[in-house]
């Protein structure tokens, strides 16, 4: 998710109080919760999601009710390939604040990465409804719905020569047109591409400014 780095760096954990002491236990990073959040956000923006997760997870443990910290952690986990963990944190933010369209978007693309396209479509549709002008929300929803349609056979039987074609059904004549007259066009069924080449293409990227 390189989408949304402005969002990560644009604020701090203002929805929680307190902070960790300057000097922690051995092996624990120095600084307070805001320092961990700021440094974690910087690492995420620089393309080091694994390192960002370490700091943001500490910040989230110290301030479990901070939505901004938990959402930044979810983005880092997504970029690090920890989709199940990212989904749980996006879901926690969305459940705490149902009007957070970005958390719904993150929930949807994480679910798609896990192969749960029904859940993905539900939450991406909510994100689009909340913020219809956000292009990457709409693109992710279109890709998820296309995948669901392909899985359901909405594009008809495969034509000869198409990948996966195994010949006409028993008792049918080769070359006949399907009864529905569609010609049997096959459709795409690819899932999310984190690099931004498809679906939820779902990087959490610079389109974040639209969310702001």
Image: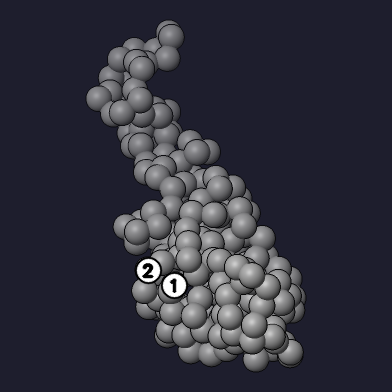
Residue at which label 1 appears:
44
Q: Nearer the viewer, residue 41 or 156?
A: 41
SS label for mark 2 = loop
Asked which quadrant contains residue 206, the reply is: bottom left
Question: Measuring 66% from the left and 60% from the top, which residue is drawn there?
Answer: 88
Q: Quadrant of the N terminus?
A: bottom left
Question: Measuring 44% from the left and 72% from the top, which residue is drawn there?
Answer: 44
Residue 124 visible from this viewpoint: no
Q: Tell me if label 1 and label 2 are in contact, CB under 8 Å.
A: yes
Q: Position of residue 17 (x, y in %)?
A: 74, 90
User: Is residue 203 found left or right of 101 in the rendered image?
Assistant: left
Residue sitting farthest toward the front: 26
Question: Measuring 65% from the left and 91% from the top, which residue is drawn there?
Answer: 14
User: Is residue 30 found left or right of 44 in the rendered image?
Assistant: right
Residue at which label 2 appears:
47
Tell me, for residue 188, which label it has, or none: none
Label 2: few (<14), some (14–19) or many (≥20) C-alpha neighbours in 10 Å: some
SS label for mark 1 = helix
Q: Position of residue 68 (x, y in %)?
A: 61, 81
């Amino acid at each position: 998710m390189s989408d949304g780095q402005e969002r990560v760096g644009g604020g701090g954990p203002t929805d929680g109080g307190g902070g960790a002491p300057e000097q922690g236990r051995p092996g624990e990073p120095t600084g307070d919760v805001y320092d961990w959040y700021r440094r974690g956000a910087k690492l995420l923006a620089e393309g080091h999601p694994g390192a960002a997760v370490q700091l943001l997870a500490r910040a989230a443990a110290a301030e479990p009710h901070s939505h901004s910290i938990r959402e930044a952690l979810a983005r880092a986990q997504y970029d690090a390939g920890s989709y199940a963990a990212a989904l749980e944190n996006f879901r926690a933010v969305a459940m705490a604040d149902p009007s957070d369209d970005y958390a719904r978007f993150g929930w949807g693309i994480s679910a798609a990465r896990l192969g749960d396209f029904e859940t993905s479509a539900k939450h991406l549709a909510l994100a689009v409804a909340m913020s219809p002008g956000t292009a990457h929300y709409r693109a992710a929803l279109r890709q998820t719905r296309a995948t669901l349609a392909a899985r359901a056979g909405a594009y008809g039987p495969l034509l000869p020569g198409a990948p996966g074609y195994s010949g006409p059904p028993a008792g049918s004549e080769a070359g006949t047109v399907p009864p529905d007259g569609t010609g049997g066009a096959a459709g795409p069924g690819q899932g999310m591409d984190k690099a931004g080449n498809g679906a939820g293409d779902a990087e959490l990227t610079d389109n974040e400014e639209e969310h702001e």
